[in-house]
Image (cartoon, rainbow, N blue to C red):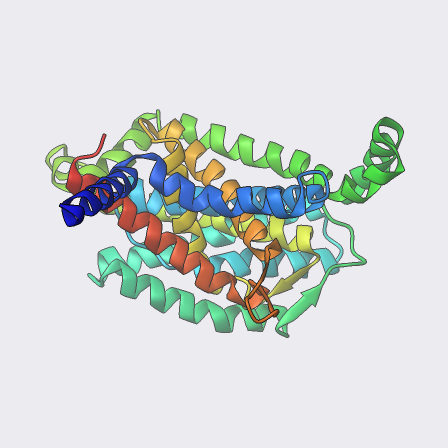
Amino acid sequence: MSQTTTSQPMEKEASGIAKLLQSRIAPILVVILPIILALFLIGGANSLGIWLGATATGLSLALVGVGVYITFRILDFPDLTIDGTYPLGAAFAAIMIISGYSPWVTLPAAFVMGGVFGGITAVIATKFKIHSLLASIIVATGLVSINLRLMGRANIPLLNEATIFSPFAAGFRDFVVARFGDEAARHANNLLTILVVGVIVILCKLVFDWFTQTEIGMAMRATGDNRKMIKALGRNPDYFLIMGVAISNAMVGLAGAIMAQFQGFADVNMGLGLIISGLAAVIVGETILPPTSVQRGTLSAIIGMIIYRIAIAAALSLRFTLPGGQTFRVEATDVKLATALLVLIVLWLTNFRKKRGAG
């Protein structure tokens, strides 16, 4: 009798856990949990700089999320070229800035160069009949040497150079101090980045959303859904695939140029493992804001990248005292591992919900 009584609460508890895992909120909790813990352990006001910095970084990387969304969701074309086109965009920005060009000119230059190498990946895949993953690995590997050739060294600092933020920095800082006091001055750079990069990201999103509603854009979207149908209509699906992958990597190259100016340097290794961050942004965004259209899809990718970066920043801020008195923390070197685990858990939870038929 006692065994039956004891087993009932355990069964209820197991059932409750299963229901939680099946619910739509489960993947969201995985992402939001570090943020909630950080808010409790650090305090919201004391960690304002962390949240603003993470938001600025997320916006700077937002176009990476959009680029990954284009290839993986719209075109159904797994692409790893972004690991090379991202530092390529940063390299072009750094080289042009130290050569005396306007930092604003570096943005379209990085956009075009990213698009060129994205197009090369798609050409290799379509014309040489090589699998998209292998084609993108080939191009990304080649870009490592190309980026080193362009930069001349592994890292180019931009700390004393003019950037897209420089013309607004002094005036915006004075405005923040006058409006919120001297304490807010230390947040001025992050706030300025959020405003400037936010405008760029929104413009890129709106232009791409408009493009997908045109005849060519709809044909590109249809190519990802059904290539045979495009052929039946007398159009060449390879053309639209090449165009889509080029647009994806163009946005990633633009993100690289923005990030180089935001963080103050370009590094040849800054794109290492970037595809995982892009996938994390897409998955997290789709979990929080399920895409019912391309417009919602690009928005979910942008939101997903911001939330993902906030979650990573929150995880890096946490400190736990172990039973032996030692302090445990997530180091900066653990970010890639944390990202991989985050993507793995969210993907598993999403598949778990689909298998169980969760609504």
Along the viewing direction, whichever of 323 and 95 lies nearer the viewer: 323
Residue 232, horizontal then vertical, whole percent: 10, 35
Along the viewing direction, whichever of 323 and 169 lies nearer the viewer: 323
- Residue 240 is at least partly visible in this image: no
Horizontal relation, residue 316 to residue 337: left or right? right
> Residue at image x 59%, y 68%?
150
Residue 92, horizontal then vertical, whole percent: 60, 58
Quadrant of image for the N terminus: top left
Quadrant of image for the C terminus: top left
* Relative vertical location of residue 257 with respect to residue 46 in this rendering, above or below: below
> Residue at image x 27%, y 58%?
132
How many numbered badges does the structure rendering display? 0
Residue 176, horizontal then vertical, whole percent: 82, 32
Horizontal relation, residue 156 to residue 73: left or right? right
Q: Quadrant of residue 222?
A: top left
- Residue 114 is at least partly visible in this image: yes
* Relative vertical location of residue 3 with respect to residue 155 in this rendering, above or below: above
> Residue at image x 48%, y 50%?
252
Along the viewing direction, whichever of 46 and 9 lies nearer the viewer: 9
> Residue at image x 48%, y 32%?
205
Horizontal relation, residue 257 to residue 307: left or right? right
* Relative vertical location of residue 70 with respect to residue 210 in this rendering, above or below: below
Residue 208, horizontal then vertical, whole percent: 43, 32
Horizontal relation, residue 147 to residue 75: left or right? right
